[in-house]
Image: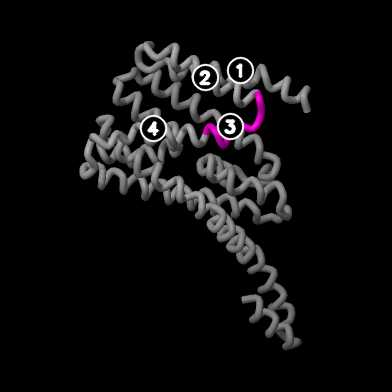
Amino acid sequence: MVSIGRLAVGWRPFRPLAYFFVLAMSPALEARTEFLGGVRAELPLLLGVVPFGLIFGVLGLAAGLPGWAVVLSSSLIFGGSSQIVFAQLFGAAAPGAVIVATVGVVNLRHALYSAAIAAYLKALPWRWKLLLAYLLTDEAFAAGIGRLRDGPATAQRHWFLFGAGFTLWAGWQLSTLAGVLVGAAIPAGWSLDFSVALTFIALLVLGVHRRSDAWAALAAAATALLALGLPHKLGLLLAAAVGVACGVLLRRFDQGAA
């Protein structure tokens, strides 16, 4: 498109029209470039997302959720760890209030992601902010924060985050659907619950960067073990609260050591 504009610029009568054409198309071309950049940044992360989605599809069915509800939860909740917790609590017949509160606590980290990118996207209209807030999850944040923080401050840079988030969303929906479709063919003796625990342990290890992170993880783990006998898996909610409180209290010592 730009080459056509350059050709027209050579014809003096058409120069004003050519300049207008190039200027009008530049934002669209920049948005497309940013979007594809976000897609390319997110694709490698799907190697871990797709198996997780398959596992959730199978576990959702095992917890007693109908197939349509498992797939719908991937659009409504759109968070792997919180969806696993939702399925486990539903299978344990936990009260609705406990399920909502626990899923909310697990998803609190998304508020931290939002705070981290708010300064880069403050000029966007609300329709864009709502869309990007919905798509902002762990992998989308990991793929997009480097571009927002270190890349050029262009007017179309939010398309990079949209490309990353949309790619993650599409991969998660398809992998969940695949898990639902093949769930009946997987023997119950495979014990996929254990693979989910291994996935969370891997995410935890990768997320520990400071002493306060390690102590918060240990405090949460100890609380979960001690509160294992609480009804409706309330120990999970209590462990999350203890871990967050411990991390906040000990963070000051990290800053003092620095």
Q: CA distance from mark 2 to mark 4?
A: 18 Å
Query: How crowded is the residue under tag 3: few (<14 C-alpha within 10 Å), some, or many (20+)?
Result: few
Residue under numbered circle 2: 220
The mark that comes first in sequence, 1 or 4, is 4
Point out the frontmost of discs 2 and 4.
2
State if disc 2 and disc 1 touch (CB < 8 Å). Answer: yes
What's the amino acid at mark 1?
A: Cys
The mark that comes first in sequence, 1 or 2, is 2
Q: Is residue 150 left or right of residue 58?
A: right
Identify the coloring.
one colour
The mark that comes first in sequence, 3 or 4, is 4
Highlighted magenta segment, given as a residue range: 204-211
Helix, strand or loop under label 4: helix
What's the amino acid at mark 4?
A: Ile
Percent across and percent down for residue 48 are 46, 46
Query: How crowded is the residue under tag 4: few (<14 C-alpha within 10 Å), some, or many (20+)?
Result: many
Q: CA distance from mark 1 to mark 4?
A: 24 Å
The mark that comes first in sequence, 3 or 2, is 3
The residue lying at 40 percent from left, 18 percent from top is 98
Query: How crowded is the residue under tag 1: few (<14 C-alpha within 10 Å), some, or many (20+)?
Result: many
Residue 246 badge: 1
Q: Is residue 178 magenta?
A: no
The mark that comes first in sequence, 2 or 4, is 4
What's the amino acid at mark 2?
A: Ala
Residue 111 badge: 3
Q: CA distance from mark 3 to mark 4?
A: 19 Å
Residue under numbered circle 4: 84
